[in-house]
Amino acid sequence: MLNSFYPVVAGRTSDAQSRYRTLYQVQAGKIGISRLQDELATGRRILAPSDDPTAAIRVIGLQREQEFRDQALVNLQSSTQFLNATEANLANIQNVITDMRGLSVAASSNVISEEERQGMLTEINSSINRLLSTANTKYQDRYLFSGGSVSTSTVALNRDLVQFQGNDNSLLSIADDGQYMAHNVTGQKALGLMSTSVVSTANLSPAAVASTRLADLNLGNGVSPGAIGFTDGVETVTIDTANAASIKDILDKVNGKVKLSGRDITLSLQTNGTLRVDYADGLPGVLRISDVGTGQTATELGIATNVPAPTLPIDGGKLNPILRLTTKLSQLVDGAGFNATEGFRITQGNRTYTITIGTAETLEDVFNAIHRSGASIRADITPDGQSIRLRSTESGSDFSIGENGGQLAERLGIRTLTAQTRLDQLNHGRGVSIGDGAEIVLTRSDGTTFSVDLTGSSTIQDVIDKVNSNVQNQTATLKITMSLNSVGNGLTLSSPPAPDGTATPVPISIYALRGSQAAWDLGLIPPGLDRKDGVLSLNGSQIVGTDPNPQEVRGVFNSLLRLREALTKSDAGQIARASGLLDEDLDRLSGSRGSLGISLQQIDDLERNHEDRQNELKAAESENLDADMASVITELNARQVAYEAGLKLLANNSKLSIFDFI
């Protein structure tokens, strides 16, 4: 404090100099008192950043973190409200499903009366309506179970079936530094509103094109930005790919710009999506390509060489780009593409939709054709970007994907019944009942028969081989051939037309031995019957089976709709199956509520952590920003005393006369 006082010089001085020095002392004291009074009034040591720049910077950082944590607390409190509302509705849904599970057990009894059955149907319909209302619950003008489509109702009733209108996106909010938390439970996760994905089993493997992004290469792992070195053993040229975004950018950086000993280097993209490097003149020579430093760019582009004198031209490896909506159909299958004129079929319930994509150029065109068809199907690309997938959003109906006279569905890998389909997957996972010995008998067009033993079969192809390779089924003019249906799904048995000059043949037929259900389970004989005859035509005789591998949505609405249908038909087997589906629903709901409870516990922990950190931040802010009131008061008293002394000195200096110098 004392260094702020202007020194009083002893000895003789001029009046003006003495007054000037005293006035300075008074002014400094006044400023000091004013500042200390401000500190007392505000409680702050720093009133402007210039007062203490270092402390001000620290305080600004602390205040920014406090603002972040304040917002994080608001987010967590909002998440808690939404999750609590979700929990209450899930509890109501679980109570409904529990009641319906008990009803299904009672309905499986063979002694219920018609009045009881009608009463059960009424109760099921009431429960479906309750679930519709609960699934469409809104909280703060947002649908709880519609995923990311917060302004769209979750489900709607259409043709007495339930259709999912939302999506399965989670809504994320910032919970902590670098940490996000979902504050919703999707209807798909809790209620089961979409079917298991029909994921492409085919290797679509798109070829890279010039516009392909570098970030999409190597199965989505991308290409690291870096430098690539070209050398002929005499001269070395390096190119920097740091600002390259697509393969075209890489091509532009090399072609016409890289020369070795006066010879141009060319980089080209082949039709199979690989890169080729060579001298523009096509003459032989030494050409090596390497990564520079610790980079991996050349390696990830597949053009790095590892021998002293590689053979020219240098053909790179596969770039493996992922699928995008803009991926052209001509890029698929390593650039070979495929003919899509025949289309494919989607069957949903008793409705069939023919998907024609003859004019489609990209995957997005294919998806748009599916969505415009009217089928309740969602088509998109899998999250890993390597396959396409289709999912049904209609509860209460079967769906399948089959051919339309060609092989497009199988080439796309989305046909739901193929030769590789396992028998234990058929009939909604119930499988095929196969006993010991022969189970089915086939009658040829001449009336003779042979039996088929399916023992040991595990796939559809095994069943096909059992028929086509049967030693008793090798006469060309009478051979019965089993194959997949050319239209839709299922198995077809066919025999050739009779040779000219012979009697009109009888149609082929199939019947089950000893009450076997294998033919039912394979869709070759309608359930409840033991025989099916073929249809004669100019092309011979055919038995066209039904689809034994229907897909479905596995969720609360599907279970209740299936239970209602089974109870209406008094089908004990399907009632038991619906009861099993309700068990799955209860497990799903319990799991969702358990996950929700864990999320709420995590929110509580995060809130406590934020509050503790807020206290630490406020303490640190106070340490840097707040004034020490005891020190301020002490200093203020000293300043006031000095100020008064300065005023007295100034008054005395102003009253000096000649007598003061005698």
Image (cartoon, rainbow, N blue to C red):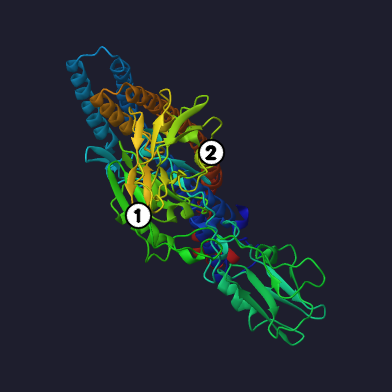
- Tell me the residue that label 1 is attached to: 370
Q: Secondary structure at mark 1?
A: helix
Q: Is residue 662 visible?
A: no
Q: Secondary structure at mark 2?
A: loop
Residue 303 is situated, as x and y percent measured from the top left of the image, at 69, 68
Q: Residues within 10 Å of mark 2 (few under 14, many from 20)?
A: some
Toward the top, the furthest residue is 111
Q: Is residue 492 visible?
A: yes
**What whole-number distance in Å separates the C-alpha atoms at marks 1 and 2?**
41 Å
Q: Nearer the viewer, residue 455 or 61?
A: 455
Q: Residue at x 29, y 29 (%)?
A: 560
Q: Nearer the viewer, residue 198 or 607?
A: 198
Q: Is residue 278 above or below residue 218?
A: below
Residue type at mark 1 is Ile
- Kindly indicate the quadrant of the structure image that contains residue 85: top left
- Work out which quarter of the rendered image holds the C terminus and state it: bottom right
Residue type at mark 2 is Asn
Q: Of label 1 and label 2, which has the lower sequence position?
A: 1
Q: Is residue 292 left or right of residue 44?
A: right
Residue 284 marker: none
Q: Is residue 258 left or right of residue 193?
A: right
Q: Is residue 160 above or below residue 566?
A: below
Residue 338 is situated, as x and y percent measured from the top left of the image, at 47, 63
Discs 1/2, front: 2
Q: Is residue 81 left or right of residue 120?
A: right
Q: Residue at x 46, y 31 (%)?
A: 604
Toward the bottom, the furthest residue is 262
Q: Residues within 10 Å of mark 1 (few under 14, many from 20)?
A: many
How many numbered markers are drawn?
Answer: 2
- Tell me the residue that label 2 is attached to: 470
Q: Is residue 527 above or below residue 405?
A: above
Residue 495 is situated, as x and y percent measured from the top left of the image, at 42, 46
